[in-house]
Image (cartoon, rainbow, N blue to C red):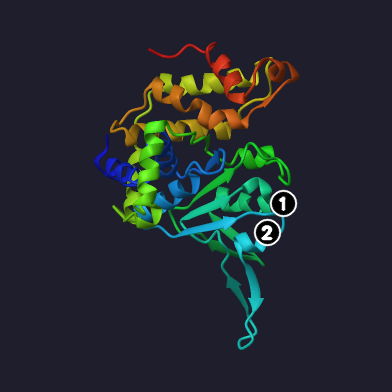
């Protein structure tokens, strides 16, 4: 494992117990400039994970609790007239940071959800003809509760497509939960996590991750998987080219975090569901046969031969 990313993982695991695979995926997303949607039940450590990541790299961290009455200006900011100079002055919103936690994103109105599109894609905010660049690195980590649907707004496909990955934390094992309870008694939380690097180190790591080698047959494997989703009788809306790029970037960052300078077919297989499943819309036949997009994608991938 890469020494710097290993230190980052170990630091986060001081508060996030037994979820190394999730921590590695979130760090991989960060190192390729991607955003993550974390869908899970309340209380499994989603907020703690994001806070621990931001504190570990000494990044500016903002959290916004999204509700139906949240306005786009709460997220991206607004312009107001300065009473002395009579000029428009930009007042920052929650998005002006390195790590934005958009908690319960599906509770925000579609208008507020759409205010994140430019932020996530362009890393900038345009207000009153002026563009405000976000600090780098910038990452949106959004959460949503898959159980409670009352008072929620479904994320449109264009919004879902902006997330590099959609992941789930999951419940801990009894042994892991015992450690979590013990840590809580001792007051060990994300607020106590110290920095093991800074944002300049993250930018350097992002450059290194971008140089990871991908063989032509591995690239072709990604394209073949994506094309299979577009031609499956179970899938109405297949993966877009943005999804192909996302899987390629994620696989390079994942290999880098694991201490390799090349991508393997296993990297692609391990990340395919996280990077592609949320971009799919199933046909009625697909919905009747599979209980999730992930299950449908796994079946489709079985028809695509992996390079050896």
Q: Which of 39 and 300 lies nearest the eye of the viewer? A: 39
Precedes in sequence: disc 2 or disc 1 = 2
| Mark 2 crowd level (few <14, some 14–19, many ≥20, 10 Å Cα) | some
Q: Is residue 212 visible?
A: no
* Residue topped by disc 2: 70
Residue shown at the point (68%, 17%) measured from the top left: 234
Residue 136 screen position, x and y as percent: 44, 55
Q: How many marks?
A: 2
Residue 27 screen position, x and y as percent: 40, 42
Quarter of the figure with the N terminus:
top left
Residue shown at the point (58%, 15%) measured from the top left: 300
Q: Which of 284 and 188 lies nearest the eye of the viewer? A: 188
CB atoms of marks 2 and 1 within 8 Å: yes
Residue 289 occupies quadrant:
top right
Residue 195 screen position, x and y as percent: 31, 55
Whether residue 161 is situated above or below residue 266 in the rendered picture: below
Residue 25 occupies quadrant:
top left
Q: Which of 272 and 209 lies nearest the eye of the viewer? A: 272
Q: Is residue 81 left or right of residue 19?
A: right
Label 2 to label 1: alpha-carbon separation: 8 Å
Quarter of the figure with the C terminus:
top left
Q: Is residue 94 visible?
A: yes
* Residue topped by disc 1: 109
């Amino acid at each position: 494992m890469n020494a710097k990313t290993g230190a980052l993982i170990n630091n986060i695991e001081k508060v996030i117990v037994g979820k190394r695979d999730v921590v590695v995926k979130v760090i991989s997303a960060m190192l390729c400039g991607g955003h993550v949607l974390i869908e899970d039940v309340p209380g499994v450590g989603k907020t703690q994970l994001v806070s621990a990541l931001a504190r570990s790299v000494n990044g500016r961290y903002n959290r916004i609790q999204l509700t139906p009455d949240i306005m786009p200006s709460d997220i991206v900011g607004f312009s107001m007239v300065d009473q002395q100079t009579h000029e428009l002055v930009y007042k920052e919103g929650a998005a002006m940071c390195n790590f934005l936690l958009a908690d319960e994103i599906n509770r925000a109105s579609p208008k507020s959800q759409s205010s994140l599109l430019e932020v996530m894609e362009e890393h900038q905010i345009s207000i009153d003809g002026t563009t405000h660049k976000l600090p780098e690195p910038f990452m949106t980590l959004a959460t949503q509760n898959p159980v409670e649907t009352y008072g929620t707004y479904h994320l449109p496909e264009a919004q879902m497509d902006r997330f590099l990955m959609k992941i789930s934390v999951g419940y801990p094992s009894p042994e892991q939960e015992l450690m979590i309870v013990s840590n809580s008694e001792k007051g060990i939380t994300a607020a106590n996590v110290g920095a093991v690097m800074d944002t300049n180190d993250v930018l350097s790591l992002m450059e290194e991750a971008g140089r990871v080698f991908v063989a032509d047959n591995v690239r072709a494997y990604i394209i073949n998987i994506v094309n299979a989703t577009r031609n499956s009788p179970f899938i109405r809306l297949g993966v877009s080219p943005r999804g192909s790029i996302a899987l390629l970037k994620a696989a390079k960052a994942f290999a880098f975090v694991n201490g390799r300078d090349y991508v393997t077919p296993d990297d692609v297989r391990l990340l395919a569901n996280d990077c592609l499943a949320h971009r799919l819309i199933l046909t009625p036949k697909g919905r009747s046969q599979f209980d999730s997009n992930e299950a449908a994608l796994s079946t489709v991938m079985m028809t695509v031969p992996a390079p050896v």
